[in-house]
Amino acid sequence: MREWLLAHLAEMGEKGVEMEGEPAMKIDAAWAEERYAKEPEGGPEAVFQRRWALTMLQFTMEVLTAEYDAAGQLAVVTELAPFVGFERDGDEERYTELAMQLKVSTGAARKAVYDFRYRHREILRNLVGDTVIDPKDIDNEITTMLCACDETGAAGVAAGPLPSAFGVLKPDELLVRALRSVRMTGGSGSGLWIPPTDEEVARLFPQYEMLGMIGRGGMGAVYKARQLALDRVVAIKLLPLEVSVDPEFSNRFVREAQTMARLNHPHIISVYDFGKTMEGHLYFAMEFVDGVNLHDMIHGPGIPPAQALEIIEGVCDALEYAHAKGVVHRDIKPANVMVNTDGCVKVADFGLARRTDAITNARGRTVAGTVLGTPDYMAPEQMRGIEVDHRADVYSLGVVLYEMLCKEVPRGFFDPPSKRVGVDTSIDEVVKRAMQQMPERRYQRTSEMKIEVQRIRKTSLMLSPNAASEISGYSFMPKITPPPASGAKRAVGSGVGLQEPLPPAEAPAAPGAPRKSRLGLWVVLFVVLLLLVGIGLVVSGIWRPEGLPKWVPLLGR
C-alpha cells in the first residue's frame, strides 16, 4: 500500500486533484510546521517514506489511546507513554515515581508498562499487516520504515519526536520494538528482575502470613509463608511479570503445574496450589523444605563419597517415578536437589518456571528461550535444542554425581573421580556411562543407575562405612526412604517436559543390572587355587607331606 499510495499521490499531483473532507488523522500543527520546515533535503519518494513511517506510528498511538479511553483509563496513557521506547539509565527512579502516580506497587507499575508496550507493538504490527499483501512481509515493511527514518541525510529523523503530544517518543525505538525478532522487555533497565518486597507480597497473598524471602534468581523469587487456613508452612514461588504475561508461557505453566501437582512421591517437593496474583504474577505454593540444597553442601562443607551415592539413590527414585508418569525434569542440578533436616532427599522444579532471559552464572541458574535447562548439566541433545526424553535426566544426574565427588562440574577432558578424590574405580564407570554422548549408550532408566550405585556402596572397599555418618557443618544425613510402588499410568496433560510414560520397572534383570556380591566367589576360587598348587608340588616331588604313603609315585623318580 505504501508503494501504491506513493504512486497514487504522484498521479493526483500531476492531475491537480485537491483533497476534500476531513483527514483520517490530524497531525499536530506546531510539530508539522517545525518538523517539515527543517526536514532534510531529499527526493519526493524519500520524504514520503519518512512521513509514511511517522504517520503509521502516530496512528498506532491514537488507536492505543482510544482503547484506554474506552476502558476508562485515559489518564493512565499520559503516564505510560514515555515508557514505550527503550529503557534508560535511571529508570528505576522513573518506575518508582510511576508507581506513586498510579497509586500501585512497583511491580504493578512494571506490569502496566509491559502491557502498554505489548499492546502498542500488536497494534502497529496489525496496522502494517493491513498494508501488505502477504503477512510474512510485515517485518520487511517495518524494516523499510526504519531505514526510511535512518536514511543518510535524514539525521535527526529517527531520534526526533513523533508528530503528537507524546513528543518524547523516538520513531526508531518504536519500530525496532515491533520487529518479531526483538524480545519484549519491561520493568528494568538493568535487565534484572527485582522481586516484590515482603510488604508487597503480603498484600498479594492475604491468605498467607509472609515470613520473608528465602531465595531469588532470574527465574523468580521464593518466599516462606504460613498458610493460615491449614496452619502449615509453605514456600511460594513468584515468577517475574515479563514471563507471566507471555500467553505461551502462561499456558504451558498451567499445564505443567497441573501435571506436577499430581506427582506424589517422598523425594519430590509437593505442589499445593498455583495461579496468578492480582498484579499478574504467576505463582505456585509448594512444600517448604527445612534444609539445604546440594549446591550449598558441595561448595560448603563438602559431601563424603558414601553420602553422595546415597543422595543419588534418592534422586534416582524421584526421577524413576516421574519418568513413569511421563514427566521429564530437564533441569537436574545441585540447586534443584534439597536435603531436609530429617535427611530426606527432595527434588524441586520439575519443569516449572524455566523460561528466563537471565544468563547462566556460577550458581547455575536456568537459561531458556528455545533451549531450556542449565548448560553445565544439559545433555548434548538438549544443548542442540532437539526433543529430549528421560535419558537427558540420566546425563544430568551423572554430572551432579561428579560434582558432588569432585566439587566441580566436568568440562572437556576431565579426570575420573577415582583420580581426583581416590574413590573406587567402579564409580568412574557409573559417571562415564551416565554421561555418554549418545542417549542409547547411557543407563536407559534411573533405576538401573540406582542398582549399580547400591552395589558399589555395599561392596566397595574404598568407601568408609562411617563416611556418611555426618556432614561437617550439618547435623543431618540422607536416610533414603523406599519409594512407593509406581504404576505406569499415562501422563495427564501435555506440554514441555512431558513424554510417553515408561513401563513399570522390573526386577533387577534389566540390561546392565549389577551382579550379586562376588566376595564368596573369590573365596572359593582362592581355595581351589591353593589345592591345585599343593597337588602340583607333591606330584613334581618338590614337596612330600609327612605321612604320605610310599606307594604314591612322584615325578622325577
Image (cartoon, helix red, strand yellow):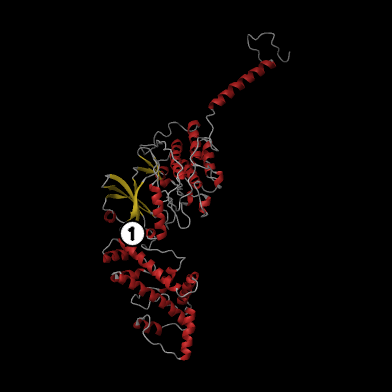
Residue at 49% over, 74% down:
133
Can residue 422 be seen by looking at this rendering? no
Circle 1 residue: 280
Residue 26 in the image: x percent, y percent? 36, 81
Horizontal arrangement in the rendering, residue 109 relative to residue 312 (left or right)? left
Residue at 41% over, 78% down:
55
Query: Does 3 sit above or below residue 375?
Result: below
Q: Amino acid at mark 1?
A: Gly
Element type at marker 1?
loop
Residue 66 in the image: x percent, y percent? 33, 73
Horizontal arrangement in the rendering, residue 145 relative to residue 288 (left or right)? right
Q: Residues within 10 Å of mark 1 (few under 14, many from 20)?
A: some
For the C terminus, the image quarter is top right
Can residue 165 be seen by looking at this rendering? yes
Along the line of sight, the residue nearer the viewer: 357 or 482: 482
Query: Does 551 sit above or below residue 229?
Result: above
Query: Does 491 sit above or below residue 63?
Result: above
- Find residue 112 and report its image quarter: bottom left
Q: Residue furthest bottom?
A: 16
Along the line of sight, the residue nearer the viewer: 272 or 144: 272
Residue at 30% over, 61% down:
106
Give the mark count. Answer: 1
Residue 415 in the image: x percent, y percent? 53, 43
Along the line of sight, the residue nearer the viewer: 73 or 409: 73
Residue 138 in the image: x percent, y percent? 47, 71
Q: Residue furthest right?
A: 557
